Amino acid sequence: MDGLPIAAQDDSWEVAGRRFRSRLIVGTGRYKDLEETGRAIEASGAEIVTVAVRRVNLGDPKAPMLQDYVDPRRYTYLPNTAGCFTAEDAVRTLRLAREAGGWNLVKLEVLGPPPFLYPDMRATFEALEALLKDGFEVMVYCSDDPIAAKRLEEMGAVAVMPLGAPIGSGLGIQNPVMIRSIIENAKVPVLVDAGVGTASDAAIAMELGCDAVLMNSAIAHAKDPVQMARAMKAAVEAGRLSFLAGRMPRQYAADPSSPLAGLIR
Ligand SMILES: CC(=O)[C@@H](O)[C@H](O)COP(=O)(O)O
């Protein structure tokens, strides 16, 4: 690869001492079936897949198992606490996940009530404290609040993951200014998690300077999930390159690409 800047040639990123090339993390739920899950994840180029421990069959060999379609030797499994509304539930769920699969790198999310399922930050802090005491490495789903994100980092979160919009809403990045502020102040990776609806949302997250993007519904609920997974891969890569390249300044008046002086009349 000759033509790319050095930064883009080796543009891997790191979380909890693990290095990845893909900046797209994908969920494993909401697909028609496990076969489609496997094909979409393959097309996304993701290296990390997040798994809702309470919803996906990881342990019953009599029923179809995710591991048969998404090979755990090839992908980093990131168990998550989807469906947990209390700190106790979230901690219990991840302890079970560790017993079942030995996973130590986990994603914590503690949700508030419907209709928005907005992150319950008080419960999230409580659960994080307990998980860190247990030796987990925790990537944390959080509100788009710079103060809360900083506090999570100071407590020991290995990544902070502010929502772009409510889970499954597909509304795109609702609060780009605060996401940007979280990124500017963070010493750990920042990922937009949840709310991505289409490829341009993923590109915007990366252009804001996110280290990566986590999504599920936008791919799983697309008319053609495999095609959308390809689109998301391209969008994350394009957004990242655009961020590295540096956006031209915005201005309110035209600036002709060719000089107007000396025109032949
Ligand atoms: C899969 C996961 O970890 C959830 O946080 C969530 O499902 C992601 O949100 P979207 O489904 O909106 O992408």
Image (tube, rainbow, N blue to C red):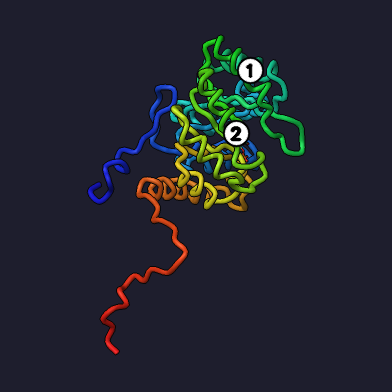
| Callout 2–callout 1 Cβ contact below 8 Å | no
Height in image: 25 above or below 99? below
Which part of the image, by quadrant, shows the C terminus? bottom left
Q: Is the CB of mark 1 within 8 Å of ligand 1?
A: no
Q: SS class of the residue under badge 1?
A: helix
Q: Is the CB of mark 2 within 8 Å of ligand 1?
A: no
What residue does disc 2 label? 145
Height in image: 109 above or below 193? above
Residue 168, quarter of the rendered image: top right
Height in image: 264 above or below 63? below
Q: Position of residue 216 (x, y in %)?
A: 59, 40
Cα distance in 3D space between marks 2 and 1: 18 Å
- Confirm whether residue 194 shows in the render: yes
Q: SS class of the residue under badge 2?
A: loop
Q: Is residue 93 left or right of residue 7?
A: right
Q: As shown in the figure, which amino acid type bears the numbered disc 1?
A: Ala
Identified at 54% across, 34% down, the residue is 69
Q: As shown in the figure, which amino acid type bears the numbered disc 2?
A: Asp
Residue 20, quarter of the rendered image: top left
Identified at 66% across, 26% down, the residue is 121
Q: Nearer the viewer, residue 2 or 201?
A: 201
Identified at 31% across, 73% down, the residue is 258
Q: Position of residue 259 (x, y in %)?
A: 30, 74
What residue does disc 1 label? 127
- Confirm whether residue 57 shows in the render: no
Q: Nearer the viewer, residue 59 or 129?
A: 129
Q: Is residue 172 left or right of residue 137?
A: right
Identified at 57% across, 35% down, the residue is 162
Residue 18's disc is none
Q: Earlier in the sequence, mark 2 or mark 1?
A: 1
Q: Quadrant of ligand 1?
A: top right
